[in-house]
Every structure is written in C-alpha cells, then in structure tokens.
Amino acid sequence: MKNKLLQGTMVLLCSSVVLRCLGFVYQILVVRIAGTESLGILNMTMPFYMLLVVVATMGMPIAITKLTAQYAASHGQAVIAQMMRTAFCLVLILSVFCLIAACVAMPEVFALLNTEQRVQQCFLVLIPGIIIVPFCSVMRGYFQGMQQMVYPSIGQIIEQLIRVFCGIGLILWVSPKDVLSLAMSLGCAAMLGEAGGCAFLAVLYLRNRRKALAGIRYSKITGSKEWLKPLLSLGLPVTGTRLTSTVDMAIEASIVPFCLIASGYTISQAASIYGQFSGVAVSLLTIPTVLTGALGTALIPAVSSAAANGQKHALQHYCQEAVSVTWAFSLPVIFVLYLYGEELGQILFHLNGLGEMMRWLSFGAVFLYLGQTVVGILQGLGMTRVVFINNFCGSAAKLIGMYYCIRTMGLGANGIACGMILGYGLQCMMNVAALAERVSMRIPWKQILLPVANSLFMVMQIQFWERIMPEGTLWFLLRLVLAAGGYLLILFCSGALKKIVKC
C-alpha cells in the first residue's frame, strides 16, 4: 500500500471481516436456538445500557485519535502521556457517576417509560460494561491515533470470540428455560467479551507506554488540567452525536413495540418482530459496513493529519477515494438484498416473510453506507458539531416516520423500514452537503455508472447460475459467491479497482 490510509483501512477491513463473520454466524445460531423474542428483549435493553456508556466515554476515543495523530510527530510521547492520563481520570469519574445512575436512576426511568419488566431485568446483567467499555475505548483511540490498527483489531477479535463461545454455551445450558433467561445469557456473554478485550488492550497499552517513555522522568508525564479543554472540545460534540443516536435507539426500542401492540400485536409478537428487525434484517443490511466502518475509522487520523498540515490535494484524494470505494462495494449488496432477502432469511435464519422488509430497507441502504463514510471524514475534519446537528435531525425524522408508518398507516414491520429510510436519507444528504462546502470533490461519472452496470451484470450471473444449478441451500450460497467473484473480476479487468485506489 502506498499510503497509511489504505494500510489502516486494510488492517481494519481484515479484522472487520473476521469480526463480521463471527458475529454473523453467532447471530444465526442465536436466532435458531434462542429465537427472535429473546433477541428482541436484549436489543430493547441495549440502548439504555449504551446511553450510560456513551456518557461515561464522553467521546474520548475520537478526541484521543485526533489529538494523538496530531501531536505524535511534533510533540513526542511525553505530551501524549499527559493527555492519556487526563483522559483516564476523566473516564473513571464519569464511569463511577454512571454506575451510580444505573443503580439509582434507571429504575425510575424504566417506570416512567412503562418499560417491559423483562427489559429491566436484562439491564442488570449489562451494568459491568459501564466501567469496562469506556477504558477499552480510550486505549483503542490511542492505538488508532498512532495508526497501530493491528492492536485494537486483535482486541476486538478476542472480544468477539469470547462472546461467541460463552454466548452459545450459555444459551445451550439454559435453552429449556424461558426467553428472559436466554436474553440475560446473551447479555452476560457480551460483558465477558468486553472484559477479555479490555484486558488484552490494557496489557499492550502498558507495554507500549513503558517503551515509549523509557528515560522520561515521571514528573513530566503527570496529568494536566490543560488537556481537559481540547479533549472536551472534541469529545462533547461526539458525545452529543452519540447520545442523540443512543436516545434515538432507546426511544425506538420503546416506540416500535408500543405501536405494534397498539396495532393489535401481542407483547410477545411485538418483541419477536423487533428481534427480526434488529437482529436479522439489520444484520443483513449492515454487511457492507465491514468496509465502510473500517474506512470511516481509518479516515479520522488520515484526514486530521492532512487538514492540519494544509495538504488540500491529499484531503481531496482521501475523500474521493473513500466515496468511490463505498459506492463500488456496497451497490452489489443492495441489489442482492432487494432481490434475495427472502431466501437469505429462510436459508440462514430459518425465518419466513423477511423479503418484503428487506426490499424496503434496501432502498435506504445506500444512505447508511455512504453516510458512515462521510461521518468519518467530517470527524477527521473536526466538524463534530455539524455531525451532531445532522444526526439529531435524522434521528427525529426516523422516529416520526416509524410512529406514523406503524401506528397511523398500519404498515407493521415495514413501517420500521420506512422510518429508517427517511432518517438515514435526511442525515446522509445533510452530511454530504456539509462536506461539499469544505472539500471540493470531483468523482468521474464512469466511477459512478460502472458499478451500477457491473451490479446488474452480477444479478444476471446469479440468474444464469440458477438455470443450470440444482436447488438447495449450498447451491444458492455458491451462486452468490460465484456472482460476487465475477463482480470483483469485472472491476479488476476494467481497471476500476486501480482507479478507485488512485482516484
């Protein structure tokens, strides 16, 4: 690779593929063994847990990534150590505060929202993560700022492996019991995974810090209150953005079951539908975020460094490269989800009736993928306030859309998808408009139209293989693999891959 952006993206992409494969297989097994109702209960609980985690983290990962990338070359490790010490102290204070809030205030919040009793019980299992996750996030931000992407990637893989093996073991152990026990087992497995990943990163961080600060007097690396202002100036807008997203998820987890029950569904059916949406449909929809998530994370230090050094050409190159890659590799997935969502639900999760929801979601998928990449660029440029405002507007539009489509129009599960399209569409367009004001991008029409033609050709390949191959699960998956390979081959032979890299 010729630049650090591509190197970092490839490291994150490889780890993301491993993580997504592990998570996807785990999700399939959970749905098959535990069912969608237990998964729905856990997913209705997670936003309330994440709300406290976001407050405890206070946007430190993004702030540390940006500041570490900015000061690593010019100011040395002693200055970065001051920043890290201040960040750890801040996160510790916030974590203790949020832990107290979880035990004292959250029962009142659940009572106010009239939250289902099973959700309140499942929340108790997740409380240890309020301490674990913020510290892990701070260390992950440090390694990403140093562009040492391998360490946090391995940490996430370890976390996912622990979660998968513990989760499967626990749900097999309690599978004869009720759905609440299954949901709590899944939550417990998630906490064990977080603890394992955090322990791994802590060992690496302490070793890396000891080597970097060899020979530097301890008095020079004590924490400084002077770092609070730059950390909070970057972290607070990020926290605002994530709080908006988390509150949005919490309201969604409350409003969707409420609207479904008001439309005539039972409590059990509402939890099951939400589990199908959040645990199955979203799992399929977010497949391309393996790439866009890795790309967005790698863009933050690369864009930050280019902007700080006044490298306008490099900044423009990064933006064009990111948008082109996102478009080229997400478009074929959108076509497959639209045409074969029903088959994927039946084959992978043993669920029927998922196809219509997947067709609705595929219309808004491009906004999700492109929006994730653009947010990474905006955060690297320090435009966190803009991201916060746009995220707030998108979240409000999504929730209003869901309520109207489910409760008023009576669209049921499809109403959830309609609300998502509205929210992600508005948020993405606002972020793209903000980026266009800051960075001038010129993407050739060929790089826009060629992936469309190639995706259509890929669909034709699938239909060709359908005529000559027998029916069956393995044959269906083989057809998708062959068509995907054909898509990549076309990009390679046409030179599109080379142009995407060089932009």
Image: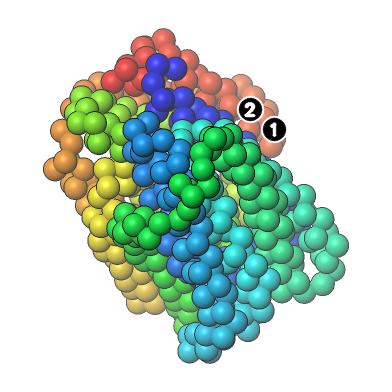
Find residue 474 and name its label: 1
Distance CA(mark 2)–CA(mark 1): 6 Å
Q: Residue at x 31, y 34 (%)?
A: 305
Q: Residue at x 43, y 14 (%)?
A: 492
Q: Position of residue 326 (x, y in %)?
A: 37, 34
Q: Residue at x 42, y 31 (%)?
A: 329
Most foreground residue, 239 or 345: 239
Q: Check disc 2 and report its element: helix, strand or loop.
A: helix
Q: Position of residue 426 (x, y in %)?
A: 26, 56
Q: Is residue 83 above or below residue 298?
A: below
Q: Are marks 2 and 1 in contact (CB under 8 Å)?
A: yes
Q: Label 1 neighbourhood size at 10 Å, few (<14), some (14-19), many (20+)?
A: few
Would you identify the image quadrant in which residue 21 lies? top right
What residue does disc 2 label?
478
Q: Is residue 210 visible?
A: yes
Most foreground residue, 50 or 254: 50
Most foreground residue, 379 or 95: 95
Q: Residue at x 63, y 48 (%)?
A: 202
Q: Is residue 366 visible?
A: no
The type of residue carrying mark 2 is Leu
